[in-house]
Amino acid sequence: MKHKFSVGSMLEACPTPHITTGQKGGSEIDLILEGRFGIIPIEIKYASRIKKPALKALHTFCEDRQLPLGIIINNDDQVRWYSDKIVGIPLAFTI
């Protein structure tokens, strides 16, 4: 069964969504969503294949805050788990 991920559906789940960018010690997170679902850090990458060094900021952010999930939106053609906490979602799946 295919699931459709939509940033819009996540925003609808927030009565008052809090969207911000974050930076900690030089490691930038492109987008941070905060709502009833908790905090979800999102990185946006142009590449279709993500290399391990590109995951460092997202991993650190999730570990420091004990978050269960971080998302990378990219140009891949399929959903791909990069670790137990980091999932890559193709841009085409989000719109």
Image (cartoon, grey):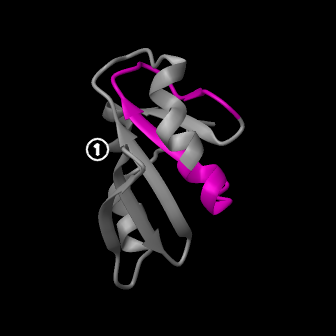
Residue that carries the numbered disc 1 in the rendered image: 95
Quadrant where the C terminus is found in the figure: top left
| Magenta stretch: includes residue 20 | no
Where residue 46 sits: x, y (%)? Answer: 27, 24
- In the current view of this chain or complex, which residue is farthest to the right? 84
Quadrant where the N terminus is found in the figure: top right
- In the current view of this chain or complex, which residue is farthest to the bottom? 15
| Residue at (62% x, 62% y) in the render | 65
Q: Is residue 86 visible?
A: yes
Where residue 93 sits: x, y (%)? Answer: 38, 36
| Residue at (46% x, 34% y) in the render | 89
Front-most of 79 and 3? 79
Front-most of 33 and 90? 33
| Residue at (56% x, 71% y) in the render | 37
Amino acid under disc 1: Ile
| Residue 31 higher or lower than 80, as above or below | below
Dividing the picture into quadrants, the one containing residue 87 is: top right
| Residue 31 higher or lower than 48, as above or below | below
| Magenta stretch: includes residue 80 | yes
> In this picture, which residue range is highlighted in magenta?
61-83
